[in-house]
Amino acid sequence: MLIDARNVTKAFGAFRAVDDASVSVEEGDILGLIGPNGAGKSTFFNCLTGDLPVTSGSVSFAGADVTRLPPEARAKLGLARTFQVPLTFESMSVLDNATIGALLRHHTAREARAKARDVLQRVGLGHVTDAPARSLGTPGRKRLEIARALASEPKALLLDEAMAGLTPTEVRDAIELVRRIHGDGITIVIVEHIMEVIVSLAQRVVVFHQGREIARGTPREVTSDPKVIEAYLGRRKVRHA
Ligand SMILES: Nc1ncnc2c1ncn2[C@@H]1O[C@H](COP(=O)(O)OP(=O)(O)OP(=O)(O)O)[C@@H](O)[C@H]1O
């Protein structure tokens, strides 16, 4: 088991954004995490990465209990993530942005830069390494976000809506990129609203609604599950349909 989250609850005051969620991810999996807006997906992600402390429950990664570890320590163990809103340093070059990720493992700037160049090539940004990050459009920013995460040489990559805002063609290219990353041996957890992405990539899917898991299974199983349809559309609309 690479990631094992047990009975994770995250409360903001009296409100439980994540309520007793248990999700495990085997090495080599591509796990999809879906659910309507506000279901608690990003909050759960943040509990996995350490960006938010859990209220209760535990998270282990690669056999180590990481529940109380900060994000940097989890990254060091091999857990990398992208953010829903890309965290790029606008005035810095594309190369320098990716180098930030590589500095986790490489202690000289020269080695870190070499690693960053390699990763930028892999994600299709090899031709814009010297451009400032602000010159990139949405697809470029999303790729840079992935490059920064990959430069930290992770075992698992958590993608939080990495394809939002892309055109259908760009989404297809991004799906190919994620396939290649997975082919390189990296375990993937993906939060995504675009169903094509989940159906094309995920081997297993967990569905959240109001902070709780309501279904799990293959993409086909969950997308035909009445509980899932109801969570997305609302009970009245389902009855109507
Ligand atoms: N820091 C916070 N303080 C209070 N409530 C929060 C906080 N962060 C998230 N929430 C609430 O927790 C719930 C779950 O939010 P979360 O962002 O995890 O959902 P999500 O499934 O990722 O939604 P989306 O698909 O819209 O990104 C929402 O009702 C949100 O308003």
Image (cartoon, rainbow, N blue to C red):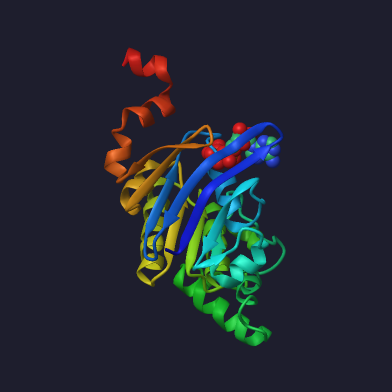
Ligand 1 quarter of the rendering: top right
- Give the answer, above or below, for where 122 lies relative to 25: below
Q: Nearer the viewer, residue 170 or 232?
A: 232
Could you tell me which residue is drawn at 40 percent across and 44 percent down?
206
Q: Nearer the viewer, residue 236 or 58?
A: 58
| Any part of residue 132 in sight | no
Q: Nearer the viewer, residue 47 or 118?
A: 47
Residue 134 locus on image (x, y percent): 66, 59
- The reply, left or right, for residue 23 in relation to residue 42 is left
Could you tell me which residue is drawn at 57 percent across and 61 percent down?
145
Could you tell me which residue is drawn at 51 percent across and 48 percent down?
161
Residue 26 locus on image (x, y percent): 39, 61
| Any part of residue 111 in sight | yes
Quarter of the image containing the C terminus?
Answer: top left
- The reply, left or right, for residue 83 in relation to residue 202 is right
- Give the answer, above or below, for where 119 lies relative to 182: below
- The reply, left or right, for residue 89 in relation to residue 181 is right
Residue 211 locus on image (x, y percent): 53, 36
Q: Nearer the viewer, residue 159 or 27?
A: 27
Q: Quadrant of residue 196?
A: top left
Could you tell me which residue is drawn at 54 percent across and 70 percent down?
78
